Image (cartoon, rainbow, N blue to C red):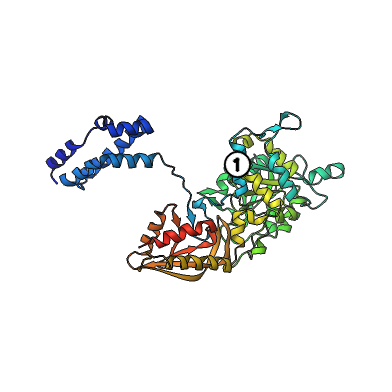
Amino acid sequence: MSTANKSALFQKLPSTDELLRQPDVQALIVREGHSAVAESIRVVLARLRQEIGDGQLNEKSLDLALGGLYATVESQLHQSLSYSLLPLLNATGVILHTNLGRAPLAAAALDHVRATAGVHSNLEFDLATGERGKRDVHVDRLFRKLFDDTLPSGTGPDSRGRLSLRGSEQESSTAISTIVVNNNAAAVLLALNSLAEGGEVIVSRGELVEIGGSFRIPDVMSKSNATLREVGTTNRTRVGDYERAINDRTRLLLRVHRSNFEITGFTEQPALDELVALARRSNLPLMEDLGSGALFDLRSVGINGEPGVLDKLRAGVDIVTYSGDKLLGGPQAGLISGRAELVARMRSNSLFRALRVDKLTYAALEATLLAYVKRDYDAVPVLRMMRLSKDEIACRAEKIVSTVASTPAKSTYLKLELLDGESVIGGGAAPSALLPTRLIALTHADLNADELSARLRANTPPIIARVEEGRVLIDLRTVFPEQDANLATALASLN
């Protein structure tokens, strides 16, 4: 298309002011506001200019576009004023899918947030005394119930973090306390800064992991103003390496759980009891970053090798950091559990206020922890999904396939098969753990797997599935049962 022809097309475009004066647009302005409508008009006109400039529109197609200009502006306005964060169906079989919001909250957590967030609450108010209170008491009391009798007797740190108290101090020193910050990276930062600022932290080279989103343990340690002292090698570290590295500047022994990868082959890692014994001999606190900390015995669902928070505290670890929205199944949060004196130092650190969480997080976390206290594990969606058996999933999958097959307007191009498969935990937890499941495999005569997947993502609500070996795979482990009917309708509509 010549420059002259493009110039003629550009001249046919109305101005923003012209469109704003039209009666239909005036009605839109009354309903949605001048600023939003004007912005939508500018977006639509800019898109038309771009298409003219790229040679995508001729005079006829431009006239068609201008004839439907009001509808296009209204559609753009609706899109701009709609929510971007949307609910969807996670059919990937990845329980803690980082891109899909990790742990879905329990119904009780949603109810508690709704009940306390829409009105005033006693977030920092002591109802018994009528005076100012502390926000962390709402969950610390529940953590104490869960961690009761966790610590081995006769040990505990003093105010400097050293571990040889006796007599009347002993009982208080063995108490477990927990504080909450906004995520696990913040928990690690606060703990390191509180316990090791200006000193050295000893950690194995094989544990200098990247937490996620390019956040790495050495970087977090640098921000905490503690000095990293690496020991051992990538694949082999012995307790003697830690012992030889201890000096007058050492403030902390750090162990980082390899939650999102494994090292196999010619490897060696000190046993936890060896590190605990070394920490006590050296009068140093031992901290472990679990990353995705579980308060539930994962062995009961066939997941081995993924230690829980209780396991670590019982073994003698002084401070454990972990996430709230992973294996715990609650809201995004960084949790620090450990000996009360050490946690008290973190609570008094000015960083704690900068990293603290709000009333929504406390409400959701309190409701989640209550489910653990009551041992109502199926109330926590993450735990319920992990506990689903292959037979339960297969029964639901068979019903969906049967429903789609019996739909009067069913597609003769869509093929559904049932296959054995495996679900994963995700979220950087238990990287080698696989849960047996039953999959619905989709193929289509006219659409490839990527196109099928795109059609499902365009559904309302969007459906996110896996694509493997030219097929779309749907795993109902991560689909809520009440979403099955919507999923069946969406599958039946593929043609």
| Residue 74 showing in the rendered view | yes
Q: Quadrant of residue 260?
A: bottom right
Q: Image quarter for residue 11?
A: top left
Query: Which residue is at a point 60% across and 34% down the rendered structure image?
Result: 119
Task: Name the residue rendered at 62%, 32% in the picture.
Answer: 120
What percent of the width, then of the height, locates residue 428? Answer: 56, 56
Is disc 1 surrounded by few (<14), some (14 to 19) or many (20+) residues within 10 Å?
many
| Above or below for 471 versus 5 | below
Q: Where residue 14 sits: x, y (%)? A: 22, 34
**Secondary structure under the numbered disc 1 in the rendered image:** helix
- In depth, the one of 176 and 97 nearer the eye is 97
Q: As shown in the figure, which amino acid type bears the numbered disc 1?
A: Val
> Which one is in front, 106 or 351?
106
| Residue 424 in the image: above or below residue 171 | below
Q: Is residue 476 above or below residue 368?
A: below
**Quarter containing the C terminus:** bottom left
Q: Give percent across and percent down for residue 376.
A: 68, 54
State how many labels appear: 1
- Say which quarter of the image contains residue 123: top right
Q: Estimate the x, y position of residue 79 in percent, counting from the top left.
A: 37, 42
Task: Identify the residue at the far right of this view.
Answer: 167
Compared across the picture, whether 69 is left or right of 399 comes to left
- In the image, residue 251 above or below residue 488: above
Q: Is residue 189 visible?
A: no
Give the labeled residue for mark 1: 113
